[in-house]
Image: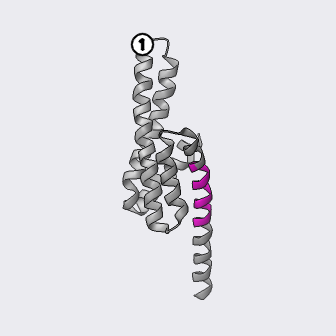
Amino acid sequence: MGLSGKFVPSLRKLAELNPEFKTASTLVYVGLFWGAILMVTGAVLSFVFVGLLIMIVAIIFMTIGEIGLIILGLKLYNVEKSGLYLIVGGLFAIGMLVPIASFLAWILIYVALGNSIARRAKTIALTTSLH
């Protein structure tokens, strides 16, 4: 729910503000959002052969979403110059083979985004107080 309700819309908004994030946004949306929907549909239909095929397609979509998350981490690193984002991108890449790494990447991206938001808030507050 958080993925489709908060993360994907926020990422799409980021892509509107900075076109550099468009590729990552599209891959995450198509891959993770639609991959999750296909996975649930496939699981419901798993008693029929077509359900298993749908689940295989869902795994392919989710892999595309993971690639989007890797690109996102690298793009955020380029913009923010925070090593945490570089680590996030690496952990998502490792997570394609070792799932616990993706779990750690989600935690780390939460921390990194919090740091970025706090840094931006300070910059805005400083700029506002100078005017």
Check residue 8 for magenta coloring: no
Q: Which is more toward the observer, 17 or 66?
A: 66
Q: Residue 95 appears at what percent x and percent y? A: 51, 43
Please provide percent x and percent y for residue 101: 56, 45
92 left or right, relative to 112: left
In front here: 60 or 131? 60
Instruction: Tell which residue pokes out farthest to the bottom in this image.
Output: 130
The amino acid type found where label 1 is placed reads Phe
Mark 1 is surrounded, within 10 Å at the Cα level, by few (under 14), some (14 to 19) or many (20 or more) other residues, namely few
Q: Residue at x 48, y 52 (%)?
A: 90
Q: Which residue is mark 1?
A: 49
Q: Is residue 112 magenta?
A: yes
The type of colouring in the image is one colour
The C terminus sits in image quarter: bottom right
Provide the secondary structure element on which disc 1 rests: helix
Along the line of sight, the residue nearer the viewer: 48 or 56: 56
Between 92 and 123, the one nearer to me in the picture: 92
Q: Looking at this rendering, what residue extends furthest in the top direction?
A: 48
Q: From the viewer's perspective, is residue 125 above or below residue 60?
A: below
Q: Quadrant of the N terminus?
A: top right
Point 59% across, 44% down: residue? 103
Residue 23 spot, x, y in % from top left: 36, 52
Q: Can residue 13 be spotted in the picture?
A: no
Query: Residue at (59%, 88%) from the top-left corner?
Result: 130
Looking at the image, residue 123 sits to the left or right of residue 8; the answer is right
Residue 110 in view in this figure: yes
Residue segment shown in magenta: 105-116
Q: What secondary structure do most residues of the magenta stretch adopt?
A: helix
